[in-house]
Image: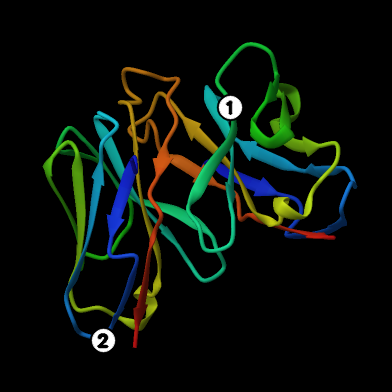
Amino acid sequence: AQSVSQHNHHVILSEAASLELGCNYSYGGTVNLFWYVQYPGQHLQLLLKYFSGDPLVKGIKGFEAEFIKSKFSFNLRKPSVQWSDTAEYFCAVSVYGSSNTGKLIFGQGTTLQVKP
Amino acid sequence: DTAVSQTPKYLVTQMGNDKSIKCEQNLGHDTMYWYKQDSKKFLKIMFSYNNKELIINETVPNRFSPKSPDKAHLNLHINSLELGDSAVYFCASSRNPRTDMNTEAFFGQGTRLTVV
């Protein structure tokens, strides 16, 4: 069965620190990769996505992620976090070629707390 | 304009009651979804509809019944509510992933259901 694993459950950083959140997935076929952010009490918003092409993708608010196919990874990075980045971050994968085409499989989420 | 809107935002009800959550999208998408976020913030798909046709039906109790009167609406009806149904339910929509691999899901603001 397909699965997504996020390495860090709770990350605490000071403002201006660099961020890297790990994400690995298990599926050998074609996948699309996403990072979503959920600010406290709000809905999921798309940070960035990878469909094909350049494995380094840039998203909103200074976030970027790198797809490493050989490692089945899609890690999220930001050079300098801000207090406003405090939120829950979800890595997600959608798989193709099955009856579940389009289904998003989420990791368990990472809570990021940025201290001012 | 809200792209994916759910009502109500909050729902508190007693065990055994029947309740519905409504979802509407104005993005012109063919495919709509229901996801459940549990108390540990884990997100899992429940159902997916494409142009009123059920295409994904995860292992969900029969008490949950989705209804799609047209492709812009996907409602969720829950019978005989149980304490374990307490969660946040998110509606989402996307272009048809079976014909457009490079599509992303847009989420509603969520409905926080509390069963007492």
- Where is residue A86 drawn, in percent x and y? 71, 56
Quarter occupied by residue B110: bottom left
Work out which residue is located at the far left of the displayed protein and give it.
Answer: B69
Q: Secondary structure at mark 1?
A: loop
Of residues B96 and A83, which is closer to you in this image?
Answer: A83
Q: In terms of depth relative to the viewer, which is nearer, A94 or A2?
A: A94
Give x and y (percent) for residue B24.
23, 46
Residue A115 position in % (x across, y down)? 84, 62
Task: Answer yes or no: are tags 2 and 1 on the same subunit.
Answer: no
In the structure shown, which secondary structural element does the residue marked by tag 2 occupy? loop
User: Label 1 crowding class (10 Å Cα cut-off): few <14, some 14-19, many 20+?
Assistant: few
User: What residue is at 55 percent from the left and 20 percent from the top?
Assistant: A51
The residue type indicated by label 2 comes to Met
Q: Disc 2 designates what residue?
A: B15
Find residue A52 and report its image quarter.
top right
Tell which subunit mark 2 falls on. Answer: B
Horizontal placement of B40 versus A5: left or right? Answer: left
* In the depicted structure, whether residue B25 falls above or below residue A44: above
For marks 2 and 1, give the one nearer the viewer. Answer: 2
Q: Amino acid at mark 1?
A: Gly
Residue found 19% across the figure and 78% down from its top: B80
Disc 2 to disc 1: CB gap under 8 Å: no
Residue placed most toward the observer, A110 or B4: B4
What residue does disc 1 label? Answer: A28
Q: Is residue A66 left or right of residue B85?
A: right
Q: Residues within 10 Å of mark 2 (few under 14, many from 20)?
A: some
Way the structure is coloured = rainbow
